Image (spheres, helix red, strand yellow):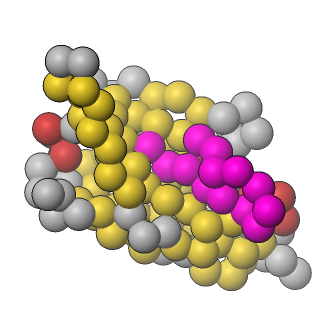
Amino acid sequence: QVQLVESGGGLVQPGGSLRLSCAASGSILRFNAMGWYRQAPGKQRELVASITSDGSTDYASSVKGRFTISRDNAKNTVYLQMNSLNPEDTAVYYCKRTTVNGRTTYIGWGQGTQVTVSS
């Protein structure tokens, strides 16, 4: 089973930037899609951005224009570039992989990385 490991989180001031990485233990080409989700204290986990195997992307309205998701198939890694961060972006960020095989959907999650935006 392919494992996902997130990195790149940390403490950043409002207006700053961070780049998160999600490294897979195997080829990410096998996945139909990969995505970044986040969960703030007391809130449900929500989609931040996703990217399909053919490179199509989707973003939550709250991050459009500020965040960019990308993938490097050679490195088996998906990135989330986060710019113009604000305190509302504070959350644990999780990487997710999705594979669809017929009528069965397989998903897997990383362990998460904390992002804190504060002055």
Residue 67 appearing in the image: no
**Residue occupying the point 27% across, 39% down:** 106
Q: Is residue 46 magenta?
A: yes
Taking the image as shown, residue 17 lies to the left or right of residue 25, namely right
Q: Quadrant of the N terminus?
A: bottom left
Residue located at (39% from left, 24% from top):
56
Instruction: Measuring from the top left, give residue 28's x and y in whole percent.
Output: 19, 46
Tally of numbered discs: 0
Dividing the picture into quadrants, the one containing residue 93 is bottom right
Q: Where is residue 42 in the image (x, y as percent from the top left)?
A: 79, 62
Compared with 89, 52 (above or below) is above
User: At 49% across and 59% down in the image, what residue appears?
Assistant: 94
* Depth check, front residue: 116 or 103: 103
From what the image shows, is residue 58 above or below residue 48?
Answer: above
**Looking at the image, which residue sits at the far front?**
103
Q: Is residue 6 magenta?
A: no
* Residue 42 as seen in the image, left or right of residue 68: right
Q: Can the viewer see residue 76 in this picture?
A: yes
Q: Which quarter of the figure is the C terminus placed in? A: bottom right
Q: In this view, does 11 lie to the left or right of 31?
A: right
The residue furthest right is 119
Q: In this view, does 60 lie above or below 45?
A: above
Q: In this view, does 58 lie above or below 116?
A: above
Q: Where is residue 72 in the image (x, y as percent from the top left)?
A: 25, 49
Give the extent of the magenta segment.
35-47
> Image point 24% across, 18% down: which residue?
103
